[in-house]
Amino acid sequence: MDATKNSETSADRVTTPLSRRDFVSVTALGALGAVGLEPSRIAAAFRSDRLLYVGTYTSDGRSKGIYWVRMSRDTGALSVGGLAATTSNPSFLTLSADGKFAYAVNEVAELNGRPTGGLTAFVRDRATNTLREIASQPTGGANPCYVTTDRRGKFLLVANYTGGSVAVFPILPDGGVGAATSFVQHHGKGPDLSRQEGPHAHCILPDPSNRFVLVADLGLDRILSYRFDEKAGTLSPTHVAEGMLAPGAGPRHLAFHPNGHSVYVTNELASTVSRLRYDSATGSSTERQMVPSVGVPTTERNYPADIHVHPSGRFLYMSNRGHDSIAAFAIDGASADLHPLQLMPTGGKEPRNFAIDASGEFMLVANQHSGDIHSFRIDRDTGRLTSTGHSVGLPTPVCIAFVRDAS
């Protein structure tokens, strides 16, 4: 859920125009179509690149849903392929491991007259990269903002922000999604009555063993752990363990370290990042370190958002909305503690979400309010970011998902 959505101004909603390089890329696509090439041959021209899908907010009418984009494996250059699917507020996406199916939460407060958001399943046309809707389900709570699969790829896990609840859905043999197999409602509130007047589930992740599911609840200042039955797709009726954060911290997103013993949390309201020690036997987590997300003096009110550990396990990155930067940290090889490394400007406004490609060489950052995606190169030895100089304009981008098969 966007902490600053209600205060967005018209100045914030200006879409960055395509650069000359991006214009040439998109024009090349149009030229190929103009001379009579089939969409499959147009898409084939870009198969040496990485394919990604971008979820957007559609409420203001500037965006239509999910878009597909290409990234050069060599330079990090970006080109917008086009609209992949028309759907309402697809604010978070996840894809199947084989790249055949995509799943999006529809972050709305009401669906068919009911106080619930939606979960939509799509099948990917490999020739055109468009997405065709094949199933949908109500999520059971308003404004779902996160979706991911369990470790076996059999179930979808959803967090409902305004609803303050979480749910599990089976992935059907045809890639569709069935009715919920589990639903848990959170209760309580936090000290910040403007943002923590009730529970706000913001992220849900399976642990590496797939035996527990962790939920970051911004409204409760807790990381709640549920036992997960990977055969039935059910959660324990109540949480079996929890990790407590500082009052008013507002935990938002989670990321596991590859060692499985550390979990990192962006604290949206406190503008901090925490390292938690994770006990895989019990599902419990204990805060061991808390550091500022922006370790320099600033007058900007800052709301950390997304967080990812580099594939090497040596670096951690998080996005800062307000300071409009990516904070990079080195991860201590022994303690897994964080050490500030760099604050890289994102080149736009409100970097809500970002993604690191499978090679660990590139990072793409979605700047929601300025309407652009910027490309950065990651130094594998130092973890530092440098701009590639490439970007594309796209209305209200809020989630980036790479296709793993890149075809």
Image: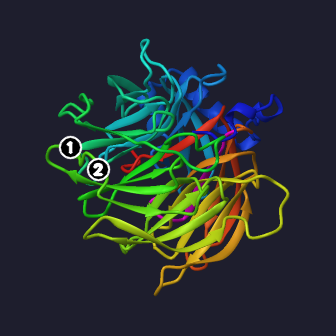
Q: Amino acid at mark 1?
A: Gly
Q: Crowding at label 2, few (<14), some or many (≥20) Cα neighbours within 10 Å?
A: many
The answer to whether the residue labelled 1 contacts the one labelled 2, judged by CB atoms less than 8 Å apart, is yes
- Residue position for label 2: 150
Q: Is residue 17 above or below residue 265?
A: above
Q: Is residue 183 visible?
A: yes
Q: Quadrant of the N terminus?
A: top right
Q: Is residue 51 visible?
A: no
- Residue position for label 1: 233
How is colour applied across the structure in the image?
rainbow
Q: Crowding at label 1, few (<14), some or many (≥20) Cα neighbours within 10 Å?
A: some
Q: Position of residue 346 (x, y in %)?
A: 72, 54
Q: Write the residue at 59% across / 36% down.
A: 80
Q: Tell me the quarter of the picture where residue 169 sits.
A: top left
Q: Is residue 80 magenta?
A: no
- Foreground residue among 14 and 164: 164
Circle nearer the viewer, 1 or 2: 1
Magenta residue span: 357-368
Q: Position of residue 299 (x, y in %)?
A: 85, 57
